[in-house]
Image (tube, rainbow, N blue to C red):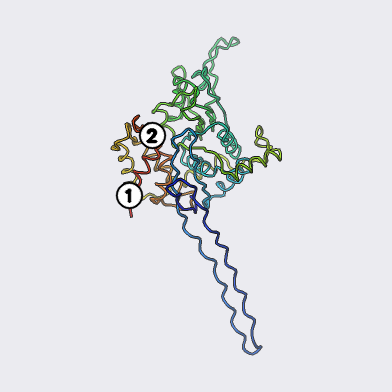
């Protein structure tokens, strides 16, 4: 989704490509004599845009503070995507890679897990994106004493009618922000399993459908921090993508200070001029176009080989399930559509491989002690699996 080259092996951010100024049209030549005017020179056509090269996701650090996603700014074919980017930019500085992954998961109708140290604008990013969509949003602050009924809802006894009525929980919304999801015990985390997979909540034996569209955006601190409960594999597998939110670049960090100095209001996003630029109908139309994106059989085989290679890696205890392959397919179609194409290329698959698979791998403890991370494993697999031509 960008015109930048893959980052170098040492992890340094890629240098921006040189800017190509548009060529100026040639001024027509004036006639030399009234009796024999010369023909006007044909204006020079502008140079066609170069095909964007897809950068490779950076490898996550073994330390608690992960590497931020690369800067991505592809030409969006739909005005909705550009409009969302513009509105988010009124509050969020940088984090373009995270925003791109967020939008790809939204278009692919999946859930997103954002991981990063405190204070890198994970929650603010979610609130700002939600403000650009004309959809309902609810937030749950996960704490150690949170109960499952606080999420899904519960039956309440009404004295006036002497009957039990169902009081909906915060999951009955379009966009659900599960803030610091790994600060609550597994019993409460499991309340989201049915919600995320089947888009319904069963209370007192009655299954109640959730509104459509529905998306869970969860944030979490690195598991190395105290007071956290690692998410179980079954729940991690329900997230379409896991994105790392890292520290901003120096220029971006200075711009953050400048905006605060000018009076940036973090408590009321709308006060910063952020407005809704897309509706549920707009999102449904975009998703329909994403689903119609063409995928060749060779691309399907490429995804299959990558998924199967994770199960035979000597440093992996648990490989990727077929659900991971489906996630790669959906994200690659959304990525291609956002890049202005109606077909998927191998570079699209490589681009989304880490966000789609990094949280589905269980690395052996011995390998973890040596600093091996899921991103390092995926880098090796992407190098070894033959790319279709």
Disc 2 secondary structure class:
helix
Q: Residue furthest right?
A: 262
Q: From the viewer's perspective, is 92 left or right of 353?
A: right
Disc 1 secondary structure class:
helix
In x, y percent, where is residue 291? 43, 45
The residue that label 1 is drawn on is 297
Q: Where 211 falls versus 52 (above or below)?
A: above
Number of marks in the rendered image: 2
In x, y percent, where is residue 199? 46, 30
Which residue is at a point 42% across and 28% down the rendered structure image? 235
In x, y percent, where is residue 278? 58, 42
Q: Nearer the viewer, residue 59 or 156?
A: 59
State the mark number for residue 360: 2
Which residue is at a point 50% across and 35% down the rendered structure image? 65
Q: CA distance from mark 2 to mark 1?
A: 24 Å
Q: From the viewer's perspective, is 266 left or right of 138?
A: right
Q: From the viewer's perspective, is 196 left or right of 311?
A: right
Q: Earlier in the sequence, mark 2 or mark 1?
A: 1
Q: Nearer the viewer, residue 324 or 254?
A: 254
Which residue is at a point 41% across and 52% down the rendered structure image? 343
Q: Nearer the viewer, residue 351 or 303?
A: 351
Q: Where 16 falls versus 269 (above or below)?
A: below
State the mark number for residue 37: none
């Amino acid at each position: 989704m960008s015109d930048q080259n893959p980052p170098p092996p040492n992890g340094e951010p890629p240098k921006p490509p040189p800017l190509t100024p548009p060529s100026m049209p040639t001024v027509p030549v004036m006639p030399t004599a009234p009796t024999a005017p010369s023909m006007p020179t044909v204006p020079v056509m502008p140079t066609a845009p170069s095909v964007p090269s897809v950068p490779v996701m950076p490898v996550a650090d073994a330390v608690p503070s992960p590497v931020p996603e690369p800067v991505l700014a592809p030409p969006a074919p739909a005005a909705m995507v550009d409009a969302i980017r513009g509105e988010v930019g009124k509050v969020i500085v940088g984090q373009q890679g995270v925003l791109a992954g967020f939008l790809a998961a939204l278009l692919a109708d999946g859930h997103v897990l954002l991981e990063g140290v405190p204070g890198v604008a994970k929650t603010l990013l979610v609130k700002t994106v939600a403000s650009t969509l004309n959809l309902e949003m609810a937030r749950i602050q996960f704490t150690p004493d949170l109960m499952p009924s606080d999420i899904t809802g519960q039956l309440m006894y009404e004295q006036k009618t002497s009957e039990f009525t169902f009081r909906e929980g915060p999951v009955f919304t379009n966009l659900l922000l599960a803030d610091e999801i790994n600060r609550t015990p597994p019993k409460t985390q499991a309340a989201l399993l049915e919600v995320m997979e089947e888009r319904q909540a069963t209370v007192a034996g009655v299954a109640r459908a959730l509104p459509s569209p529905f998306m869970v955006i969860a944030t979490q601190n690195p598991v190395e921090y105290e007071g956290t409960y690692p998410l179980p594999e079954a729940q991690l597998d329900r997230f379409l993508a896991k994105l790392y939110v890292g520290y901003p670049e120096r220029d971006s960090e200075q711009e953050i200070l400048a905006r605060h100095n000018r009076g940036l209001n973090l408590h009321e996003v709308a006060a910063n001029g952020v407005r809704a630029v897309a509706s549920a109908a707009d999102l449904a139309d975009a998703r329909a176009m994403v689903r119609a994106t063409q995928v060749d059989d060779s691309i399907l085989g490429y995804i299959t080989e990558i998924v199967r290679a994770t199960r035979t890696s000597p440093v992996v205890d648990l490989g990727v399930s077929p659900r991971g392959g489906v996630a790669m397919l959906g994200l690659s179609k959304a990525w291609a559509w956002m890049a202005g194409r109606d077909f998927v290329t191998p570079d699209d698959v490589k681009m989304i491989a880490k966000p789609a698979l990094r949280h589905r791998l269980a690395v052996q403890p011995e390998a973890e002690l040596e600093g091996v991370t899921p991103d390092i494993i995926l880098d090796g697999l992407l190098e070894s699996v033959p790319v279709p031509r």
